[in-house]
Amino acid sequence: MVSDALTGAERLVHAAAGAGVQVCFANPGTTEMPLVAALDQQPGVRAVLGLQENVCTGAADGYARITGHAAMTLLHLGPGLANGLANLHNARRAHTPLVNVVGDHTSWHLPYDAPLASDIAALAATVGTVRTIADSDSISEVTRGAIDDAHRMLGVSTVIVPADHQQHRAPEPPSEPTKPLARTGVGSARVKEVATRLREAGSRAVLLLGGNSLTRAGQLAAGRVASSTGATLYSETFPARAERGGGLPNIDRLPYFPEAALAALTDADAVVVTGASDPVAYFGYEGIPSVLTRPGTLVRLAQPHEDAEEALLELADLVGADTPVPRVVAVSVPNDAAALTGRTVGQVVAACLPDGAIVSVEGGTCGYPFYTASAAAVAHTVLTNTGGAIGQGLPCALGAAIAAPDRPVIALQSDGSALYTIQALWTMSRERANVIVLIAANHTYNVLRTELGRHGNSEFGPQAAALTSLANPLVDWVTLATGLGVPASRVARVADLRHALTDAVASGGPYLIEMGL
């Protein structure tokens, strides 16, 4: 029974629980101690400690991608929020509902510009909406409003809570119904216009899928449309969540490099964007257009916040599409004696996936080959790095494992980006998260060497070589993982990886496998 004797912090946690928040990924400090105490008074909210804020924000992102409901983070002042901004950027680009609770100095101490004082609201505004609690009376209303913001806008919201408002007693607010996550519907008139464009373009059409068009139902509807019209199917380059395998159409990602993406889209008379952002180059390069579609060819069926799945189902019915017979193709398995490369790792992981697995992919070395091979795998879910801020893969896998403890999670991870949020391993161990981490240990920032080559630097000088190498000293992933509480092993051949991955899945995580490439 909630009474007027509760503090503002207790009201905030109670309001969050009432709005359906079940997990708080926390890295608190002095100004959040009342909130830490309040979490003990609310058994419905699980507190998960992250040793660095970017672990917390990335885990909240992964959790919400799987559940479809906002998770909460608890962060310490502006510096703590700033530490988590990289993965909040990724969450914003993934259109993930996520709520940050950030403590601030007591309201009467703010004018003195204490050493840890900063403009928290300005930092938070770079990734989403911001609400600041002005008194303890409004704390429940503001908290519910922030959660509603996250669900309504499919994005990040932040609540700033001065420490004194956490400590003061707060009255019981009137009860209000919570607003579940809801996507905006696409009008039938727009669907009919798109159907007309598709009929006109025929085989010179491309459907670019993102958002909730990458559900199983959405992809099957897209397959029907392609079968009827001859259109080519792509997913956006970095989908927040894509169902994969289990008889779904083989929909590959739009290539990352702009030359290849242009080649995929340049002959299209209609590029129908369905739940994805408009296709633009990841970076600007001289002589290459930023916009990857020809003028007049871009057609928007559904924006990222709209119900792309429902729009695709209606579109498939309009174009008279029959359900194509799924083409069953076995995963190509490399020779057991073969060395590990990006291609062989992708094939082994795809072949060894347990049904219903979640795969968090960060890094191109194995990520792209795996995604291609995984079309023939059992049904699974893939999460990718939507915003390009590295350090996302391990926390996202952690959050996904907490969201779906009955599903095995595999983090297919490059070594350089893993080091940004390696503290996630400690939380995986503490929470006994069922995550199998596969580290592609080539001890190199390969993507940067590729970019150097694209800028005409075919030969690296000593400083360029050093700035793109992780080989001096070599990171010992087995020792590092073990020190953070995660058992680990090292493999160098296909047979070794296949046996180690199969055993790890059977035993359950957390477990780390260093793959020598």
Image (spheres, rainbow, N blue to C red):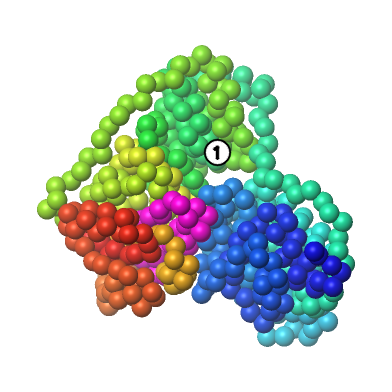
Quarter of the view holding residue 415? bottom left
At 62% from the left and 75% from the top, the residue drawn is 28
Residue 23: x percent and y percent? 60, 61
At x 47%, y 61%, the residue is: 398
Which part of the image, by quadrant, shows the N terminus? bottom right
Magenta segment boundaries in residue numbering? 394-422
Q: Is residue 412 in the magenta section?
A: yes
Tell me residue 4's x, y (percent): 87, 69
From the top left corner, tell me how far across and down residue 479 is, in percent.
Answer: 30, 76
Location of mark 1 (residue): 212
Which residue is at the front of the view, 116 or 106?
106
In which quadrant of the rendered view does residue 156 lie?
bottom right
Q: Residue at x 44, y 62 (%)?
A: 433
Does residue 122 appear in this view?
no
Amino acid at dot 1? Asn
Mark 1 crowd level (few <14, some 14–19, many ≥20, 10 Å Cα): many
Query: SS class of the residue under badge 1?
Result: helix
Q: Name the residue rendered at 69%, 45% in the picture.
A: 180
Q: Is residue 504 above or below residue 187?
A: below
